[in-house]
Amino acid sequence: MVIAKARAVDGPDKLFRKAEIQRRDLDSHDVLIEIKYAGICHSDIHTAHGEWGGEVNYPLVPGHEIAGIVTDIGSEVTKYKVGERVGVGCMVDSCGECENCRQGEEQYCLEGNVPPTYAGVDKYGEPTQGGYSTHIVVTEDFVVSIPENISLDEAAPLLCAGITTYSPLNHWNAGPGKKVAVVGMGGLGHMAVKIAHAMGAEVTVLSQTLSKREDGLQFGANDYYATSDPATFDKLAGTFDLIINTVSAKIDMNAYLSLLTLDGTLVNVGAPPAEPLAVNVFSLIGHRRSFAGSMIGGIRETQEMLNFCAKHNIAPKIEIISADKIDEAYERVLASDVKYRFVIDVSTM
Ligand code: NAP
Ligand code: ZN
């Protein structure tokens, strides 16, 4: 058993503290990973603050954007060797047998047996604890390989922000001739801009203000509008084939649906605290519009996304922090003051 150094939080209003957590002995298909970097996703904050309803098992070690090195493998592991650069995202197992798992869409496991990387319960009945820690043990099927030309610090955010935006862009065919809007340019949003641009789509950012406009254009956006300006909604009415909403707070969905063209789709990936989003049926039926959602992506697609990013030289823009700055980073994410993903240097744990 490995004792990992970690940062844990004891309740919704508590600050992070040093902790030690036990990582299980390796089962035959397990991989032990020495974590080098862990990204901070807004979902970590929603969870740590208990915002999604349901009971959170504190102490909680968040972190599902994990990049590190394999340091030991179980007796029957075939996919990874000691020394390889690997990543772990938002889930660490699934039933593996239902139709969705067999199709490689493990995040939609029909048995509901997907232990999230933290705040879940694994098949041994133990609480899962995430990447704000020095080590993790994961079954090899839920580990992905990090391509050579992506550094480990920049790889970490791809494991959630990258796949969560790649998957809907891929599924709804972002590409040449398609007008894609990205709502909110934080961690997920800035990856959506880079990936949609690399897929060949025409990309527009819809941000609260124009303060990050230069960055957005540099990430590959063709246009950038402030949603605080009501004229934006008049000007862009009926424009987009696809809108990816990454906003972490509740927004007026009907205003954004009005920006879709005939047959356009608004995909919600943002996951604000559990309260209903009001969608007016007339926002949908007028132009045969669709309102959809998407959750991360399967393991095969996550590897495909990493390979895509390697091929197109896409990396997140990150700010590396030491482990004692997590609370400060949370404050800045909540203030939309993140450029564009905080990544914890786990050597400071
Ligand atoms: P983030 O870095 O905080 O980005 C969210 C962005 O939303 C902000 O940068 C800001 O963009 C905009 N925003 C924030 N508050 C707003 C408000 N009140 N009104 C309008 N816009 C606002 O967060 P993230 O890590 O990208 O995550 C975004 C959301 O996706 C979170 O809710 C997270 O839980 C969820 N998520 C879902 C999945 C999934 O599988 N579906 C996976 C990961 C994360 P501007 O400054 O540009 O306006
Ligand atoms: Zn995430």
Image (cartoon, rainbow, N blue to C red):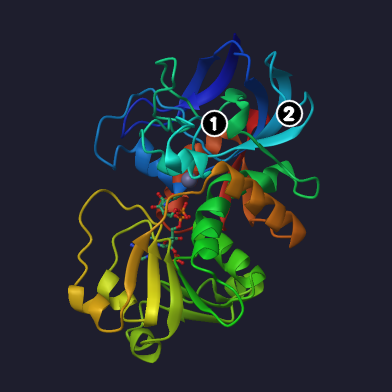
In the image, the residue with mark 1 has its CB under 8 Å from the nearest atom of ligand 2: no
Task: State how many labels appear.
Answer: 2
Label 2 amino acid? Tyr
Quarter of the rendering containing residue 249: bottom left
Neighbours of disc 1 within 10 Å: few (<14), some (14-19), many (20+) = many
Neighbours of disc 2 within 10 Å: few (<14), some (14-19), many (20+) = many
Residues 321 and 130: in front is 130
Label 1 amino acid? Tyr
**Residue 338 visible at all:** no
How far apart are the alpha carbons under marks 2 and 1? 22 Å
Residue 178 appears left or right of 313: left
Label 1's element? loop
Identify residue for label 1.
Answer: 132
Quarter of the rendering containing residue 269: bottom left
Furthest residue in direction bottom, as rendered: 235
**Residue 341 visible at all:** yes
Number of the label disc, if any, that sits on residue 94? none
User: At x 33% / y 75%, what residue is drawn?
Assistant: 256
Number of the label disc, if any, that sits on residue 80? 2
Establish if 200 lies above or below 1: below
Find residue 208 and report its horizontal and vertical position in percent.
40, 71
Residues 348 and 221: in front is 221
Find residue 144 and report its horizontal and vertical position in percent.
65, 38
Establish if 313 lies above or below 235: above
Residues 321 and 124: in front is 124
The numbered mark, 2 or 1, whose residue comes first in the sequence reads 2
User: At x 28% / y 70%, what residue is drawn?
Assistant: 253
Label 2's element? loop
